Amino acid sequence: MFNQTHTFSNGVKIPLVGLGTWLLDDDQAAQAVRDAVSAGYRHIDTAQAYMNEAGIGEGIRSCGIAREELFITTKVAAEAKTYDEAAKSIDESLTKMGMDYIDLLIIHSPQPWKEFREEKRYDKENQAVWKAMEDAYKEGKVKAIGLSNFLQDDIENILESCEIKPMVNQILAHVSNTPIDLIEFCQEKDILVEAYSPIAHGAVLNNKEVKVMADKYGVSVAQLCLRYDIQLGLVVIPKTANPEHMKNNLEIDFEISEEDMETLKNVEQIQDYGEHSYFPVFGGKLT
């Protein structure tokens, strides 16, 4: 079972494989946490926007593992763009989950979702939210702080004014959609990159080229995709509520050759994420 970790500069350890819980309701999330912990997971990822923090908390309390053995991430809502809104939301997340602290807190997006990747950058607003997160960190409410969906200029804006550097940037990164320049920029700044939807939200599973390579290694397409991100130096947080998939996602103790890694980096980019293509992170537009 794959159980490697990364250690932040402050000594906090983050498991390199976590459980994503996007699109799971409270009941599903609670059961998913219990199943994941039973399978060996110690890293659970949620967000205020997922509306399942209460379920995550219930799963944590009932999973049979001590809280301090688990690494829990949540995210400040993309629409919270003032110091006060962010500070209030952090306390609300702690209350909903019934926890004394959050292991990793990140800003879900540099812009509200309805304005995702538009011209307005929300520079000053993001700096204010970051200040609220720094204060929560100093107060012991969170153990690590980071970003999500931030491009290079968004990150540079935080770096210009921050007291505590971002430790993480969580982005869409998978076979057929790998933002190498952004990943390398983050790594140069000692910012750990986390990959959400590392299996392309399922859209890569029927790619014939990737399937042939997975067969070569005697693994599933999902396992090949997870290992690909791991070898790029990323954390992966595949979302699933299926206990069998949870177990399989931890069976990635194999090595992809350098030649095959290069091939995977150049797989034709996915243009269609199926029924979920309307989400901004997959190129859609909320109205």
Image: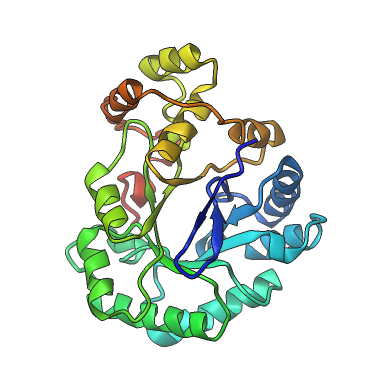
In the image, residue 152 above or below residue 93:
above
Q: Position of residue 247 (x, y in %)?
A: 67, 34
How many numbered dots are placed on residues in this image? Answer: 0
Identify the image's colour scheme: rainbow, by chain, secondary structure or one colour: rainbow
Name which quarter of the figure residue 232 lies in.
top left
Name which quarter of the figure residue 260 lies in.
top left
Q: Where is residue 68 in the image (x, y as percent from the top left)?
A: 70, 65
Q: Is residue 76 visible?
A: no
Q: Looking at the figure, which quarter contains the N terminus?
A: top right
Q: Position of residue 191 (x, y in %)?
A: 35, 60
In the image, residue 81 above or below residue 172:
below
Closest to the observer: 78 or 254? 254
Outermost residue on the left side: it is 119
Please report the residue visible at 63 percent of the width from the left and 64 percent of the height from the top: 53
Please report the residue visible at 35 percent of the width from the left and 55 percent of the height from the top: 286
- Residue 13 horizontal side relative to residue 184, left or right: right
Q: Is residue 22 visible?
A: yes
Please report the residue visible at 34 percent of the width from the left and 32 percent of the height from the top: 272
In the image, residue 211 above or below residue 243:
above
Closest to the observer: 222 or 66? 66
Name which quarter of the figure residue 69 lies in.
bottom right
- Residue 173 horizontal side relative to residue 157, left or right: right
- Residue 137 horizontal side relative to residue 39, left or right: left
Q: Looking at the figure, which quarter contains the C terminus?
A: bottom left
Q: Position of residue 157 (x, y in %)?
A: 23, 72
